Image (cartoon, rainbow, N blue to C red):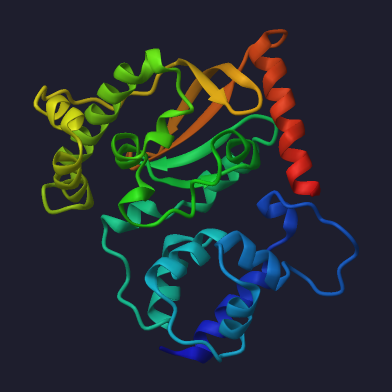
């Protein structure tokens, strides 16, 4: 681990970013350029004290998961992310795990959506980034760990994962989740994380095992869906999907036509999101 190189790189990247680059309010007048340490720490899901020690060359070697979170928070390119890993004394991520790194250009597209839910997911339905509207709708999904990072895994193992969909839609959604996983499994192979998910779900869920035997393969995203919010109830939205060139990530944007009940509820959701930021 090269503590000097790591600290210098983190500090330089933090100082070159502006709050507006990350969709943050500019707030009161700043004495220093760039982001504050506490802002980077919050975006990366770590304590300010821990991040400060990284910049002051006083921390133990950060984990790969922590470095991946910092790479997302600081909007690093893939080359910059690889440098970060090397400076911290880690091997650079493999091509399979690299698919979880959000390209800055795709993140900038996500940041353009402020009044409607939008999120970036991997082929395994891992939430890699989400705006505050998506967090208000689904909760914070981006900082989960292990197999639970995958929405597919949670769907078949955690009853709470199904609460955002009407019960009448559960069977259709289950089929779509399995078809998506089989498509990823075919692309990534049995020894990949997709294969690990299949093995775990086969043991954990008879429903999954039965659907897996149907051999359905597809990247499915419903054009129209109903989502359930604990405070606002059912919200009808249209789902638009933008894939990266290699198909490893997808940007999902949820909208509703003007002058509809769904549109009005999204406006109420925005008000709730604003209240949480203000609070």
Image location (x, y in percent) of residue 209: 13, 32
* Residue 129, position as x, y percentages in the image: 51, 47
Query: How many numbered discs sit on the rendered protein?
Result: 0
- View extreme (front): residue: 159
| Residue 143: x %, y % from top left | 48, 55
Left or right of 9, for residue 185: left
**Furthest residue in direction right, as rendered:** 29
From the viewer's perspective, is residue 82 above or below residue 205? below
- Classify residue 98 by image quadrant: bottom left
Q: Is residue 124 above or below residue 232?
A: below
Residue shown at 45% from the left, 18% from the top: 166
Please give the name of the residue rendered at 48% of the width and 60% of the height, measured from the top-left corner: 77
Residue at 18% x, 50% y is 196
Identify the image quadrant of residue 231.
top right
Task: Find residue 160 and report its horizontal and vertical position in percent.
Answer: 43, 36
Can residue 212 be seen in the rendering of this structure?
yes
Q: Nearer the viewer, residue 149 or 21?
A: 149
Give the side of residue 40 with respect to residue 28, left or right: left
Q: Is residue 246 visible?
A: no
Taking 91 as reference, is 56 above or below it?
below
Query: Which residue: 26% across, 63% down?
Result: 94
Residue 95 falls left or right of residue 40: left
Choose between 82 and 70: the one closer to the eye. Answer: 70
User: Which quadrant holds residue 204?
Assistant: top left
Q: Quadrant of the N terminus?
A: bottom left
Report whether 244 appears left or right of 23.
left
């Amino acid at each position: 681990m090269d503590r000097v190189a790591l600290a210098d790189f983190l500090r330089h990247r933090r100082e070159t970013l502006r709050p507006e680059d990350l969709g943050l309010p500019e707030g009161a007048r700043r004495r220093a350029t760039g982001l504050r340490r506490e802002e980077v720490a919050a975006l990366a899901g770590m304590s300010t004290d821990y991040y400060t020690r990284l910049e002051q060359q006083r921390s133990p070697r950060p984990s790969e998961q922590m470095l991946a979170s910092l790479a997302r928070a600081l909007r690093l390119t893939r080359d910059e992310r690889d440098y970060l890993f090397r400076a911290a004394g880690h091997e650079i991520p493999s091509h399979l795990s690299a698919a979880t790194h959000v390209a800055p250009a795709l993140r900038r597209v996500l940041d353009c959506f402020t009044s409607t839910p939008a999120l970036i997911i991997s082929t395994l339905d891992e939430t890699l980034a989400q705006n505050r509207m998506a967090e208000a709708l689904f909760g914070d999904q981006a900082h989960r760990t292990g197999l639970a990072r995958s929405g597919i895994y949670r769907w078949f193992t955690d009853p709470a994962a199904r609460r955002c969909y009407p019960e009448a839609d559960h069977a259709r959604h289950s089929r779509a989740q399995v078809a998506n996983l089989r498509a990823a499994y075919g692309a990534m192979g049995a020894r990949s994380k997709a294969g690990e998910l299949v093995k775990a779900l086969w043991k954990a869920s008879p429903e999954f095992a039965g659907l897996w035997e149907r051999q359905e393969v597809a990247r499915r995203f419903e054009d129209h869906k109903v989502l359930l919010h604990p405070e606002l109830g059912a919200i009808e939205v249209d789902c638009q999907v933008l894939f990266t060139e290699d198909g490893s990530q997808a940007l999902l944007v949820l909208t509703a036509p003007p002058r509809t009940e769904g549109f009005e509820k999204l406006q109420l959701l925005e008000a709730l999101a604003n209240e949480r930021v203000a609070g």
